[in-house]
Image (tube, rainbow, N blue to C red):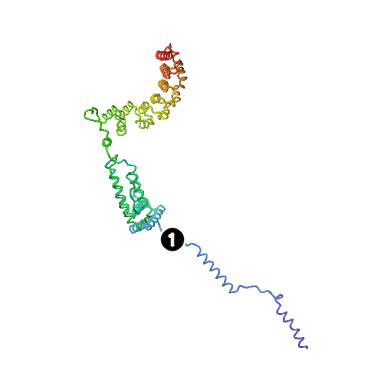
Amino acid sequence: MSNGDDENADAPEDAADEEAPADAEEVPEEETPAADADETETTDAEDAESEASEPEEAETTELSTETLESRLDDAEAALEEAETEADLDEMDADLEAIAADVEAADLPEPEDEEEEAPAEALESRTEELRGSLEEARGPYAEDVTEAVDEAATAVRDTRWTEAGEPDARAAIETFLETANEELGTSISVAGDKLDDFAAALESASEAVTDADLDPDADDETIASLLEIAGTLDADIDAAEEWDDLTVVEQLRARGFYDRMTSENRKDFPPELTVVRVAEAENDPERILMALEKLESDFMQENCIDALRRLGSEEAFEAMHERAQKRKQPPIEVLGKIGDERAVDTLAEFVDSGNPPLQKVTLRALGEIGSEDATQAVANALADEQTGVRSQAARALGLIGDTRAINPLADALGDESEDDAVRASAAWALVQIGTERALEAAAAYDDDRVYTVQVEAEKASDATAI
């Protein structure tokens, strides 16, 4: 038993010894070699990663004259070897980069002022290569369609001679035949008019676009189409048109000289004879031909004089166009023609402040006789110029609008007004001829101005009838 107690007694001491750390002296912690190794490896890895993430400093090439010239040499060689559009695009990008570097480079200035600066020489050579690059491109399908469309426009817009029109038609037919072979199409002319021929060319242009020709893969087809389009353009240009003829040839082709004979040819130049014969025969068409084609002041004046004497309606468009430029002779012709379509144009000139133009215009409006012009003409009774006021009064008399009676009577009764204006007002009232107008004029049969008395007496005689 005692042995068992001893063993039990010793046990607590042993247990106490094992749990002693609570009362034992603390030992300071020390870094272990293993921990040092791990931390060192981590630090090295982080440093390596940091170094890897930092971009390496790019190597810079010195932008010297020599290096830039060498790059241009390489570009020139690349141009000679280029075979596709992609090659040319790549070279284009290289030239852009070279141009930028030339601009950025700090190149030396020449000591001699007359010597070309390196930068200028490099820029010049770069531009020359760019020009060569553009020349090396293509041909493209767009070049063909542009040429064909231009030919179609020329066919439509050109006035051909009798000899030139068949040549233009033949050129188009030849082009279509060859183009159909190249494109595998069957385009033809649908009618006999020149517009039909032009439409066929436009159809051919659309067919070229629809073919979606590649400048590399279809270069031979494009080149062939461009060649026949060039031939078409040359043939169209060679076909005779009216503008190729001299003025005399154009007039002769239109029968201008047909009425001139050795017996009636009395004037020089001979075109003047034609104009006078045409006037005598009341033929404004040939006079208008001469007006259109003969640009000398002499012939222009003679043509307009003849048209004024004829007063033919056929001359309205030509005279109206010229009158819009405020030219007086054509305005006079419009008055003789008497077409009311001219009123709106002429009414704008009544208050122009240009007395000669105003008087010619007022006379023309009076001759046309449209009441649409009454107000504009009546306004001219207040113009500063005596001659304008007098002509306005006479124009109102010719128009005959009764609305003008009161302003005319006022002008006649104004003792401070110029005698010529008062006489014109009296004349105008007689021309209007209504009872009220005649009475207003007749009241001045004893006027101090003789010309006023004359008109007043006419008014009195008319009222007595």
In this orientation, which residue lies closer to the viewer: 440 or 216?
Answer: 440
Residue ID at (46%, 21%):
402
The answer, for residue 110, to whether it is visible in the render is: no
> Pointer 1: residues within 10 angstroms few (<14), some, or many (20+)?
few
Residue of label 1: 59
Quadrant location of residue 452? top left
- Indicate whether 274 appears above or below 197: above
Question: Quadrant location of residue 439?
Answer: top left
38 relative to 199, above or below: below
**The residue positioned farthest toward the top in the image shown:** 446
Residue flagged by tag 1: what amino acid is it? Glu
In the rendered structure, the answer to whether residue 199 lies left or right of residue 31 reads left
Numbered circles on residues, count:
1
Q: Residue at x 70, y 79 (%)?
A: 18
Residue 71 locus on image (x, y percent): 37, 57
Q: Which quarter of the figure is the N terminus placed in?
A: bottom right
